[in-house]
Amino acid sequence: MKVCVIGAGVVGSFLAKKLSREGYEIAVVDVDPSKLEQLSLTADVLTINCNALEVNCLKKLDDFELFVVVTESDEKNVAITTLLKSLFKKERIIFRVTNKALSSPPVKEFLKAEPVNILSETVQKVLLSVKYPFAKEAIRLEGENLIILKIEVSVESPIAGKQIAELSPLRRELPFTIVAVEREGRVIIPKGEDFIFQGDVIYVAVKEEKAQELAKVLKIPYQPVRLVFVVGYSPFTEDLIGKLSELKDLKVKFISRNKRKCEEISGKYPEVDVFFGEPTDAELLKQEGIDRADLVVSITEDEEANILSAILSKRLGAKRACALITHPEYEEIVESIGIDIPIAPRKVLAAKVYRQLSRRKFLEIVELSDNLDVVEIDVEKESLVKDSDVCGLIVAVKRDGETEIATGSTLLKPKDKLICVVERK
């Protein structure tokens, strides 16, 4: 498939490189020749220096099938999408926005294109970290009542040293499926005879209302999140603070060097403690009780500042820290330097793109790792899950509007839909 990425910023360049490595024919359009020159040195892509708001520019892209519009401007992305739809009759378009109104169902229906609200998705990731503090990451499968929790196996864990097939008693107590195992930098789909070892990171699918019980079954000690520090201001900050302030029994503290934003947040959210100062001021952080923080969210537009702030907070005693990361190179090292939760908005967009590229029906959140996806597959013939070979690993079965975790003895029927984990081809 021929894919055109409009916008050669960090997100657009990341997508272009990733898709090019996987064999897709990629073109990247941008008005800034320096960005295109830099990209052409590191990826096998066609670069086109023109303004996508001009018809003559878009005419050069007429033979492309999928368009990913990711400039820095919401308004520009919507305008380009409108031109592609109205003048060039393009059917498959994904466009990035941060304004909630522009990603609403009426706008999506009007444009007949796929909006990706990176702001909302990023805020949702932080909220899941608050809700499930025992997990390294939580991935919600929208509309399925399922969640995949990324959990590190401790020496005290009842599953450490056991084969997956030996976990049947625990699974009868609480239905769950280990859908992937991360070990020594590799993420694999496990089989029944595979062992789980201390230090492994496992991806566990469970019904969302049972997620808290999973921590008990796997004997994972944790304390509920009671104090969150939000450090720095960016387009993500206000939406995040608004969502956090709605949660019961949660105290929020906000620190920023932007005095005007401090005044705005203080006026809008009186229940939030607001402090004007440097996010890396150790004395200020100590004075405000950073050592009692259950979670620190460093979410400025400067990712280096986010990393430094998160590291400092952890060294001063904060239990967990997450940082907004833009560049892929940083994401690869942040966990090794003490940051628990890297937030990478570009992955949200990548998931949407893979959904469009695949012939299978992808779920709303699809990417578990660089090589594994969650997909939805129709059942064509009756069989037991343990005898089925329709996908890599069957996670759950959807039948009559209900979704249930699958076991080896689950009977699959025609017209069922399976939620599966598969290796990306």
Image (cartoon, rainbow, N blue to C red):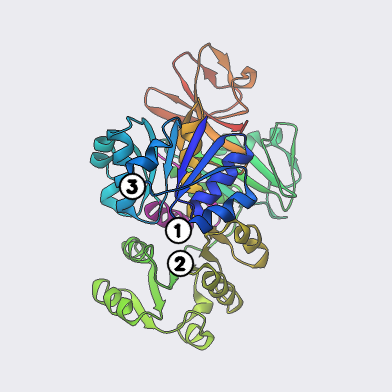
Task: Look at the numbered disc 2 and give the secondary structure of its residue.
Answer: loop
- Say which residue appears at 23% left-offset and 40% top-offset: 106
Q: At label 3, which amino acid type do we have?
A: Leu
How far is the residue under mark 2 from the one under mark 3? 31 Å
Of mark 2 and mark 3, the one earlier in the sequence is 3
Q: Which residues are magenta?
A: 118-143
Above or below 225: residue 62: above
Above or below 271: residue 209: above
Magenta span includes 251: no
Of mark 2 and mark 1, the one earlier in the sequence is 1
Q: At label 1, which amino acid type do we have?
A: Val
Task: Look at the numbered disc 1 and give the secondary structure of its residue.
Answer: helix
How far is the residue under mark 2 from the one under mark 1? 10 Å
Q: Are marks 2 and 1 in contact (CB under 8 Å)?
A: yes
Residue under circle 3? Answer: 53
> Counting other residues with Cα less than 10 Å from the Cα at mark 2, is it few (<14), some (14-19), or many (20 or more)?
many
Residue 303 appears left or right of 264: right
- Say which residue appears at 63% left-offset and 30% top-offset: 425
Seen from the viewer's position, the closer of residues 54 and 81 is 54
Q: Are marks 2 and 3 in contact (CB under 8 Å)?
A: no
Q: At label 2, which amino acid type do we have?
A: Ile
Of mark 3 and mark 1, the one earlier in the sequence is 3
Residue 102 appears left or right of 218: left
Residue 44 appears left or right of 28: right
Residue under circle 2? Answer: 299
Residue under circle 1? Answer: 126
> Counting other residues with Cα less than 10 Å from the Cα at mark 3, is it few (<14), some (14-19), or many (20 or more)?
some
How far is the residue under mark 3 from the one under mark 1? 35 Å
> Counting other residues with Cα less than 10 Å from the Cα at mark 1, is it few (<14), some (14-19), or many (20 or more)?
many
Quadrant assignment, res 387:
top right
